[in-house]
Amino acid sequence: MTEPEPAAFPAPPTSGENAAPSVDRAAFRGAMSRLAAAVSVVTSDGPAGRVGFTASAVCSVTDAPPTILVCMNAASAQNAALVTNGVMCVNTLCGHQAALSARFAGQTGVTGAARFDAHPHSVAATGAPVLADALVSLDCRIERIVRIGTHDVIFGRVEAIVHGPGEVESLVYFGRGYHRLPATPGESTGQSGG
């Protein structure tokens, strides 16, 4: 089976009566703040060194083969290291891990590999760090990167899954703030091996 070529769509006109309406950045960001998203710390290690950053733009792409995507500012130093390393682990945070998210978001002044110093972690099969107590960690090899505007969309094939210690309360980002989202009573964690 051959892979389909990416479709190229013509750019909308930028002037004249058929011009596409323009949405300014502030309005777009305001709209996006109304979308609740799980909070993850994406980690990597390899030739470019150990890096980690907080991300809420993470989602599943397909389960055959298991693939996820992460969106990241292309100008970020962590982005360059992630691309060079070729591996990543997406650590979805539990409800009590807002301080860890802030640390990896750069809100505490700690930078680079020092972000890992205050939090226990192990090493995944790919070599990427797995953060202790994460709700779930997805160990991935990077398969493709697509640049769109200021960001890279990084596609990773999931090679291993590590389930956390059992807490089923997720940390979500909504309305420009952290919130704890409890599981529905009786909800399964979805653990099925791996």
Image (cartoon, grey):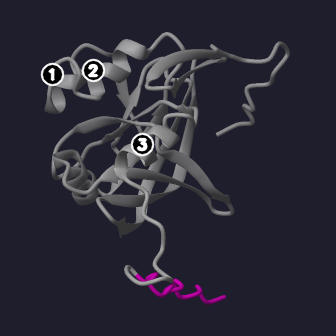
Query: Along the line of sight, which residue is nearer the eye, 70 or 150?
Result: 150
Q: Please say if 188 is above or below 68.
A: above
**Residue farthest along the front direction in this orientation:** 17
Q: What is the C-alpha distance between the residues marked 3 and 1?
A: 26 Å
Residue 160 point in image, percent of width and height: 54, 44
| Residue drawn where x is 49% and y is 10% of the image | 96
Placement of the N terminus among the 4 image quadrants: bottom right
| Residue drawn where x is 42% and y is 15% of the image | 98
Residue 118 point in image, percent of width and height: 25, 13
Residue 113 point in image, percent of width and height: 17, 31
Q: Please say if 182 is above or below 78.
A: above
* Residue 125 appears in the figure: no
**Start-end of magenta stretch:** 1-13
Q: What is the C-alpha distance between the residues marked 1 and 2?
A: 7 Å
First reached walking from the N terminus: tag 1 or tag 2 = 2
Query: Along the line of sight, which residue is nearer the eye, 12 or 58?
Result: 12
Which residue lies under the disc numbered 2? 103
| Residue drawn where x is 33% and y is 58% of the image | 151
Which residue lies under the disc numbered 3? 29
Element on which disc 3 rests? helix
Question: Mark 3, mark 2: which one is toward the viewer?
Answer: 3
Element on which disc 1 rests? loop
| Residue drawn where x is 54% and y is 14% of the image | 95
Type of amino acid under label 1: Val
Tally of numbered discs: 3
Type of amino acid under label 3: Arg
Which residue lies under the disc numbered 1? 110
